[in-house]
Amino acid sequence: MTHLELGPIGVTLDARADGGHLDDAALLESLGYSTIWIAGGQLATLDPLRDVVRATGKVTVGSAIVPVGRYSAEDVVAFRRDLEATDPGRLITGLGGAHGERPLRTMNAYLDDLDAADPPVPASARMLSALGPRMLELSRDRAAGALPLLVTPEFTARARRILGDESTLAVMEYVVLERDPERARATVRESVGFLTRVGGYRQNLRRMGFGDDDIDSTSDRLIDGLVARGDVDAVATRVRRHLDAGADQVVLVVQPTDPDDVPRAQWRALAETLIG
C-alpha cells in the first residue's frame, strides 16, 4: 500500500461557526505543521475540509474523522471529486465511526462503495481510525494506514508490527501544556471519559492494560497513560516515544486549560520545539 509522506508532526483544528479557524489554519501552516487534521465527528457538513484546503497553500488536510454512520460513501465521493478538481492531492480522507455489532463488515462495505465509485476514493488517499487488530489489518490492506486515538506508545509499537513497514501510522495524542498535574488532568478528563464510552475504545483500553475501574472513573492512571501533559519538554519526550515506537506522524490534539480559548500560544510553543 502507498506510504504517505505526512511529516512527523501534525495538528488538529476544530471548525468554528464564525470561520475563525481559517485564519488559524493559515497560522498552523506557517508554523510548519505538515498536516492539519479537521475534527469531523461533530461537523454538520464536510465543507470545513474544503474551506481549510482553500485557506492554506500546500499543507495536507485530513479528516479526523468522517463518521461512516453519518455520511454516505456517495457524500464522500462527491465531496472529494469536487475538491480534486480544484485542489488535487490536498485531502486525506480519514474514516471511522463504524460502530455496532459488525464494524468490520460495515467498514468493508463502505470501502467497497468508495472503490466502485467513478472516480473512486483510492486506498492511497484514505486512512482508518483503527484500534483493534482486525481493523488495523483492514487499514493495512484497504487504506494507506491507520489513525488511532487514545493510545499508548506500547500500542503504537504493536500497531506498527501489524501494519508493516509500508503502511502509514499517524497517532493522535491529546496534549495539555500545563505543569500542574491536577489541572492538566481536569482539562481532558471529560473528553477522555466521553470517548471511553464510544465504540471500541473501552475494549482497546483493556487490551492496553487498563482496568474497568480506571475506565469507568477516568482515573489519573488512565489519563497519565494516554495524554501528553506538562511542559513542552515533557510533551516532546512523549512524542518521541511514539515516533520511536513506529509512528510516522504524531498528531497533536492540543487542549487549552480554558475551554473557551484557542490554543495559539501552545501551537507556537510546540512548533518551536518539535518542528524548529
Image (cartoon, rainbow, N blue to C red):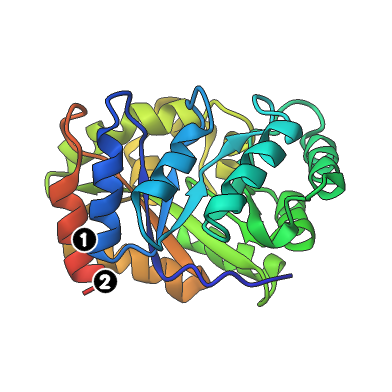
Question: Where residue 270 is drawn, which disc sits there?
Answer: 1
The reply, left or right, for residue 225 in relation to residue 138 is: left
Classify mark 2: residues with Cα within 10 Å, few (<14), some (14-19) or many (20+): some
Q: Which of the two residues, 51 or 235, is positioned nearer the viewer here?
A: 51
From the top left corner, tell me how far across and down residue 244 is, in percent: 45, 76
Residue contact at pointers 1 and 2, CB within 8 angstroms: yes
Residue found 36% across the figure and 71% down from its top: 240
**Element type at mark 2:** loop
Question: What is the C-alpha distance between the residues marked 1 and 2?
Answer: 8 Å
Q: Quadrant of residue 4?
A: bottom right
Residue that lies at the very extreme toward the front in this rendered image: 86
Residue found 82% across the figure and 32% down from its top: 102
For the C terminus, give its image quadrant.
Answer: bottom left
From the top left corner, tell me how far across and down residue 262 is, in percent: 20, 37
**Element type at mark 1:** helix
The reply, left or right, for residue 128 in relation to residue 41 is: right
Residue found 32% across the figure and 31% down from its top: 189
Question: Where residue 275 is drawn, which disc sits there?
Answer: 2
Q: Which of the two residues, 77 or 273, is positioned nearer the viewer here?
A: 77
* Mark sitting earlier along the chain (1/2): 1
Residue found 40% across the figure and 63% down from its top: 58
From the top left corner, tell me how far across and down residue 7 is, in percent: 43, 71
Classify mark 1: residues with Cα within 10 Å, few (<14), some (14-19) or many (20+): many
- Where 260 sits versus 36, above or below? above
Q: Amino acid at mark 2?
A: Ile
- Where 253 sits versus 142, above or below? above
From the top left corner, tell me how far across and down residue 260 is, in percent: 18, 27
